[in-house]
Amino acid sequence: MTRPIHIAIAACLMGIALAGCKTDGVVLNDGIVRTNEPTPPELTAFGDTFKGLKTVSDVEFYASDEAVAQATNQFRQSNYGNAGAFFYKAVLLAPNDGVAWLGLAASCDRIRRFDLADKAYRHAFQQLGPTPEYLNNYGYSNLLRGNLQAARNNFLRAYELAPNDPTVNNNLQLLSSSVHNIER
C-alpha cells in the first residue's frame, strides 16, 4: 500500500515542477513553439531591443570622418603639421579613404616632405583616379617643387575635367605669374 502512495506523491511533485515551467518561445498558428526567434520586448546584451539594432548599412559615419574633419580644420588654419598628423590618423583608420590620402599628400607638400607626399599621392591615385582635385593638388605639388612643366600639364588636365573650378583657374594664373616673375 505504501507503493501506490509513493507513486501518487511522485506524480504530484512532478506535476508541480512541470507547472512551474514555461516556454519563452513564440507560438504560431500552427501550434509549433519556436524558441530561436526573439520576441519584440526581448533585450540584447547591450540593453536595446532587437528592433533598435542598426545594421552596418545604417551607419551614417566612418571611423575616419572625425580625423578628416579635424585635419581639414587644421589645414585651413595653416597648421600643416597638425593637419598631416590628423590625415595620417585618418588613413590608418580607413586605408581606402582617398580624400584622406589626398589631404595627407597636400599637408606633406606644405611642410616640404615631398618624399612622403609622393607616397600619399600614389595611394590617393589608387583610390580616386585622375579626378580634378587630384590633378590640381598634384600640379600644385609640382609647382612647389619648381617643376613648372609637370605642374602645367596637371593643371591643364584638371581644367579639362572641371573648367569652371575656381581653384584650378587660380592655380593656372599662379603658374603663369610664376613663369613671368622668377625669384632668385
Image: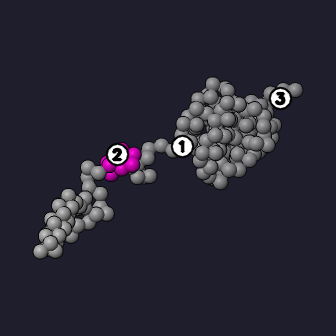
Amino acid on which the number 2 mark rests in the picture: Asp
Location of residue 44 in the rendering, given as x and y in whole percent from the top left corner: 36, 50
Question: Looking at the image, which residue is at 61% across and 41% down?
Answer: 90
The numbered mark at residue 63 is: 1
Name the kind of residue labelled 1 in the image: Ala
The image quarter containing residue 101 is: top right
Left or right side of 43 for 119: right
Let me know if residue 13 appears in the view.
yes
The residue at which mark 2 appears reads as 48
State the quadrant of the N terminus. bottom left
Task: Please tell me how many numbered marks the rendered image carries.
Answer: 3
Q: Secondary structure at mark 2?
A: loop
Q: Are marks 2 and 1 in contact (CB under 8 Å)?
A: no
Q: Which mark is residue 182?
A: 3
Q: Amino acid at mark 3?
A: Ile
Q: Which segment did they paint magenta?
A: 43-50
Where does residue 105 sit, x and y in percent of width and height?
69, 41
Would residue 161 be seen by someone viewing this image from the given angle? Answer: no
Along the polypeptide, which appears first: circle 2 or circle 1? 2
Badge 2: residue crowd in 10 Å (few <14, some 14–19, many ≥20): few
